[in-house]
Each structure stands twice: as C-alpha cells, then as structure tokens.
Amino acid sequence: MKKILLIPAICLLCISCNANTNDHSSEPNQTQSQPADWEITASVKKNLMADSSLSSSARMISVTTNSGVVILTGTVVSREESHKVVKIVKSVSGVKSVDNQLVISNP
C-alpha cells in the first residue's frame, strides 16, 4: 500500500520540480542562502511523505511555492493534522510564510 502511494507522490514531485526549473528570469539577485522555489517544494513534499503519523490524504496534498510562500491545498482529516502539516512546512529552510488552504474532511 505504501508503494502505491509513493509512486503518485514521486510523479507529482517531478512535475512540480520540472515546472519551476526553467524560469529563473524573475530571480536575478537570488543568493545561495535562499533556496529556489522548486527546492522548497521538494523539501516540503519529502518531509510530509516521511511523516508516517500523517494520513495518506495529508501526505498527498498539493504544495506550490512562489517566492518562498508555500501554498497548501488538499484535504486533511482534522484541524490538528492541518496544524501539524503547517508546522512541518514552516520547519523547511527558505519558507517565508504558509498559505494554508487545506480542507478538513468529515470523518
């Protein structure tokens, strides 16, 4: 079951990374201390997938990053899980803020 969930997650991660790798024209003064948006997105997804205490829906949420602002969309099972996801995201280097658009599903 874990392998089945891992394959779509890796596909989404690859798509997200590929979409952000070619457009660096708006970031001429980016320093090495600030990771690129695709690197932040990849780190967030990696950390979410690694946390086995999260539900499968929480580990599969959509993560996009724009200038260090991480936008979360998708479904989680509880308010507590939503808070935990935000805490995980904020721990990633380069995250300036989190736009939490997560929806709490009915049990």
Image (tube, grey):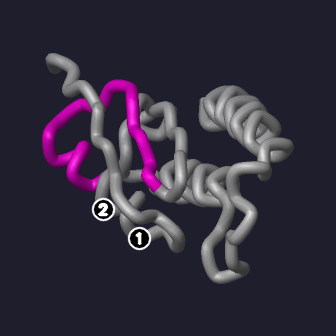
Span highlighted in magenta in the image: 69-84
Q: Residue furthest right?
A: 22
Amino acid at the residue labelled 1: Ser
Image location (x, y in percent) of residue 50? 55, 56
Q: Secondary structure at mark 2?
A: helix
Q: Left of 70 or right of it: where is 19?
A: right
Q: Left of 30 or right of it: where is 75?
A: left
Residue 71 part of the magenta-drawn span: yes
Residue labelled with disc 2: 87
The residue depicted at 41 percent of the width and 29 percent of the height is 57
Image location (x, y in percent) of residue 33? 64, 82
Q: Quadrant of residue 75?
A: top left
- Determine the CA span between mark 1 and mark 2: 6 Å
Q: Secondary structure at mark 1?
A: loop
Q: How many numbered discs, if any?
A: 2
Residue 3 part of the magenta-drawn span: no
| Image position of 40 with respect to 45: above or below | below
The residue depicted at 65 percent of the width and 34 percent of the height is 9
Pick the quarter of the image with the C terminus: top left
Disc marking residue 91 = 1
The residue depicted at 52 percent of the width and 73 percent of the height is 93
